[in-house]
Amino acid sequence: MNNVFVTSDLHLFHNKSFIYEPRNFSSVEEMNTAIVDNWNSIVSAEDDVYVLGDLMLNDNERGLELIKTLNGKIHVIRGNHDTNTRMELYKTCDNIVEVCEAKFLKYKKQNYFLSHFPCLTSNCDEDKPLNARVISICGHSHVKDVFADWDKGLIVHVEMDTNNCTPWLLDTLYEKIKEKVTM
């Protein structure tokens, strides 16, 4: 069975220091290289990767070239920097298998709502088992803590900033969520 990964906010070629410096890089080129290397070290060609928005900025041509080097079957969910033009460009990449606005995903009996933006997906159902609830997986905020919005509900962040510029294996993320729920 193939693995499933989730991540967001790669911001390839976004040459603003407020993006790459908090990630401990001295340049956008250094960040781009680390993201591709980290990604391809854990993702195989058969794996599915859900990217919850903001893949690239500024240089669409070079951004697409870099995206085409990423392993896996990539599912793109629109972020605030994913213009209509970029959404159409993503469809030209052979490794991108889906481009959409948001998505419900059922994986190993757990329900997830995948969106670039944090969403409240459950309320007043803390008494229900985890697999009867919907977990919101998101990006956008560039937080370092996957549980930055936990006080608002079952909201989990997967920005590149949360995992050392590496996609999250969904099974690993789910284990962290289960631990958090039982605390």
Image (tube, rainbow, N blue to C red):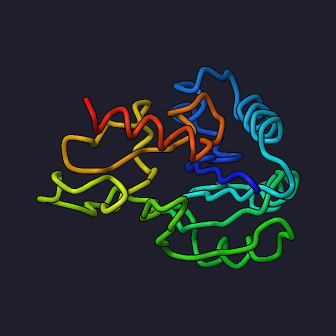
| In-image side of 114 versus 153 (left or right) | right
The N terminus lies in which quarter of the figure?
bottom right
Q: Residue at x 45, y 63 (%)?
A: 115
Q: Residue at x 25, y 29 (%)?
A: 183
Number of numbered markers: 0
141 or 111: nearer the viewer: 111
Instruction: Give the percent coordinates (x, y) of residue 171.
Output: 57, 44
| In-image side of 96 versus 100 (left or right) | right
Instruction: Give the percent coordinates (x, y) of residue 102.
Output: 48, 72
Farthest residue toward the left? 124
Instruction: Specify the quadrant of the image occupied by residue 73.
Output: bottom right
172 or 89: nearer the viewer: 172
Q: Residue at x 43, y 54 (%)?
A: 137
| In-image side of 118 versus 142 (left or right) | left
Q: Is residue 87 above or below residue 17?
A: below
Instruction: Give the percent coordinates (x, y) of residue 60.
Output: 75, 61
